[in-house]
């Protein structure tokens, strides 16, 4: 039924990113020699920028999406967007577009139009800053996410179901978050329930498990817990993932284990595919 839901300013989509910023997220990713926390922050910032671009029309940024980022570490759980604003966790994309915290620059290699490659500095806004310290209070983070999604769903009963994308590299240090995840999966709109995507970020070059149907090949107890916490891949995403070359089915879970840098980017693209629905 998702394919027939039109996204509009009256019926927006909610994307909530839940980000582990504990001490271990400061370790390097082997494939890019960059701290995990920095790469994850970069991907989230690019994802937010892409969502803004999709909403940027001749009359300004239209609020087709509501977006939130909750980060958690030794200091607790923090609303990483609109920190100085007295607002909730999920906010209209136009407000987020106006409240970046700074800019970063990268050097890209591009074709100069004459068959030669040249370097070009590109500047882009940032909303989420990399951080890595302390423990992993995952239960506290899922508890705040639950409250935010419940409030949003009550106010947007006819909207596309919310999507929660959780990024972590370790075990919870404040209890078992499974019950909270199940409660979140039961929160929804008249169109369906919240989907939870879990991605485990690797510190080592090892085999990646993508969108599994069962946990038999997952040897790590914590990873099996994340598998159980994840939603089934919605039917509309099964078709789109198949088109992108993924080996998935209606039994696949929204879960990737031991993800490298490229897997994180692809995971975010799959998780935010509802943003490509028709908008009015």
Image (cartoon, rainbow, N blue to C red):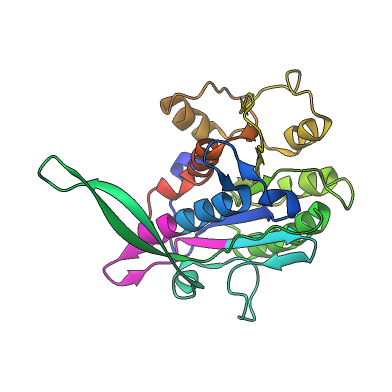
Is 57 contained in the magenta span?
A: yes
- Residue sitting at the far top: 216
Q: Which residues are magenta?
A: 49-67
Q: Is residue 92 visible?
A: yes
- Residue 152, percent from left and from top: 64, 63
Which residue lies most toward the right here?
175
Residue 134 lies, with reference to residue 27, above or below; the image says below
Residue 51 sits in quarter: bottom left
Most foreground residue, 166 or 54: 166
Residue at point 48%, 43% (across, down)? 269
Front residue of this view, candidates 182 and 85: 85
Q: Residue at x 61, y 47 (%)?
A: 36
| Count of numbered tags | 0
Residue at horizontal 75 percent and vertical 64 percent from the top = 77
At a point 45% along the width and 50% down the height, the residue shown is 275
Residue 146 occupies which quadrant of the picture? bottom right
**Seen in the image, is 180 located left or right of residue 32?**
right
Q: Position of residue 268 (x, y in %)?
A: 52, 44
Question: Is residue 122 within the magenta segment?
Answer: no
Q: Residue furthest left?
A: 114
| Residue 179 point in image, percent of width and height | 84, 45
- The picture places residue 4, in percent across and down from the top left corner, at 45, 43
Question: Looking at the picture, does residue 127 appear above or below residue 17?
Answer: below
Q: Quadrant of the C terminus?
A: bottom left
Query: Along the horizontal axis of the image, is 215 left or right of 92?
Result: right
- Observer able to see residue 1: no
């Amino acid at each position: 039924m998702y394919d027939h839901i039109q996204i509009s300013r009256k019926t927006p989509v909610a994307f909530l990113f839940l980000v582990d910023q504990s001490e271990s997220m400061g370790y390097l990713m082997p494939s890019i020699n960059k701290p995990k926390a920095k790469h994850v922050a970069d991907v989230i910032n690019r994802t937010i920028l892409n969502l803004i671009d999709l909403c940027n029309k001749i009359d300004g940024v239209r609020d087709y999406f509501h977006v939130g980022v909750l980060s958690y570490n030794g200091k607790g759980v923090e609303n990483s967007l609109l920190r100085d604003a007295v607002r909730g966790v999920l906010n209209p994309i136009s407000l987020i577009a106006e409240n970046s915290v700074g800019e970063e620059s990268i050097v890209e290699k591009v074709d100069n139009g004459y068959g030669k490659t040249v370097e070009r500095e590109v500047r882009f806004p940032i909303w989420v800053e990399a951080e890595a310290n302390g423990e992993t209070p995952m239960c506290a983070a899922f508890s705040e996410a639950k409250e935010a999604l419940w409030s949003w769903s009550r106010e947007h009963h006819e909207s596309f179901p919310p999507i929660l994308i959780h990024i972590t590299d370790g075990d919870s240090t404040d209890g078992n978050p499974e019950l909270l995840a199940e409660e979140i999966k039961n929160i929804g709109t008249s169109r369906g329930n919240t989907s939870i995507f879990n991605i485990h970020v690797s510190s080592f070059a090892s085999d990646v498990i993508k969108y599994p149907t069962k946990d038999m090949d997952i040897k790590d107890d914590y990873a099996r817990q994340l598998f159980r916490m994840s939603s089934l891949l919605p039917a509309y995403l099964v078709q789109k993932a198949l088109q992108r070359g993924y080996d998935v089915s209606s039994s696949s879970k929204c879960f990737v284990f031991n993800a490298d840098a490229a897997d994180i980017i692809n995971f975010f693209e799959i998780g935010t595919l509802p943003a490509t629905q028709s908008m009015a």
